Image (cartoon, helix red, strand yellow):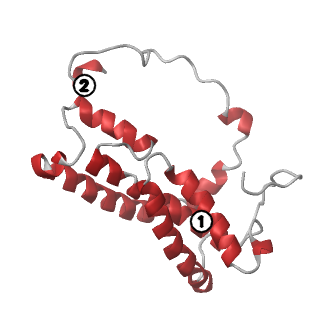
Amino acid sequence: MLESTSGGQKLVRKTGRMLFNAKEAGQCVGATLRSSVVGFFVGILPGAGATIASAITYMTEKKLSGNSATFGKGDIRGVAAPEAANNASACGSFIPMLTLGVPGSGTTAVMMGALTLYNITPGPAMFTEQPDIVWGLIAALLIANVMLLIMNIPLIGLFTRMLTIPLWFLARPSPPCPRSASTRCTAPPSTCC
């Protein structure tokens, strides 16, 4: 945990408005741009992931701010920097998968496994043999980011209410899965599930 308090977490009932204003947006521009670049390059490193990118950018912004006492107490840059790095890292992790055939994160490892099930080998040859898949994936990332922006802003209220769900409810054990992950299926993926 980057910052901890001895008092634990407190639920704040009403903070005012849900969206940020122009002044807060102006404060975040530098942090967002810096963190996006750092997050992208950390995402390119295989296995580094979004968590490392978020931690690096949070600490960097805290040092660059000049007043680190405001971080952890509502400074908007403390939220903007890790989120920008997190999102950029997710996009950067596709580069080693697509160019080298090495998964850049856990998500790209799962995607690489899914592509392999369909006899698509990620790597440099993928750009020449199956460019439609590569460019389709890049277009899907762009569309997904736009859709996230459109959908997340109206759902902020719902997401903040989800924080009131008790931990004991979220962390309870799951029922056993009907089909084990260790089951081997040699048929095409559409008939295995």
65 left or right of 129 in image: right
Q: The C terminus lies in which quarter of the figure?
A: top left
Name the residue that disc number 1 marks. 57
64 left or right of 51 in image: right
Three-letter code for the amino acid on which mark 1 is drawn: Thr
Crowding at mark 2 (Cα within 10 Å: few <14, some 14-19, many 20+):
few
28 left or right of 142 in image: right
Q: Is residue 153 visible?
A: no
* Closer to the camera in the image, 56 or 165: 56
- Picture residue at 64% right of the left edge, 65% below the top: 58
Q: Residue 7 at what x, y percent from top left?
A: 89, 52
Q: Is residue 34 above or below residue 42?
A: below
Q: Residue 60 at what x, y percent from top left?
A: 64, 69
* Closer to the camera in the image, 98 or 186: 98
Residue lying at the far left in this picture: please name it.
129
Q: Residue 90 at what x, y percent from top left?
A: 43, 54
Crowding at mark 1 (Cα within 10 Å: few <14, some 14-19, many 20+):
many
- Picture residue at 37% right of the left edge, 64% below the top: 146
Q: Is residue 113 visible?
A: yes
* Closer to the camera in the image, 13 or 69: 69
- Picture residue at 51% right of the left edge, 58% below the top: 86
Three-letter code for the amino acid on which mark 2 is drawn: Pro
* Closer to the camera in the image, 141 or 161: 141
Query: Disc 2 versus disc 1: distance between alpha carbons?
Result: 40 Å
Kind of element beneath mark 2? helix
Q: Residue 18 at what x, y percent from top left?
A: 62, 69
The numbered disc on residue 26 is: none
The numbered disc on residue 189 is: 2
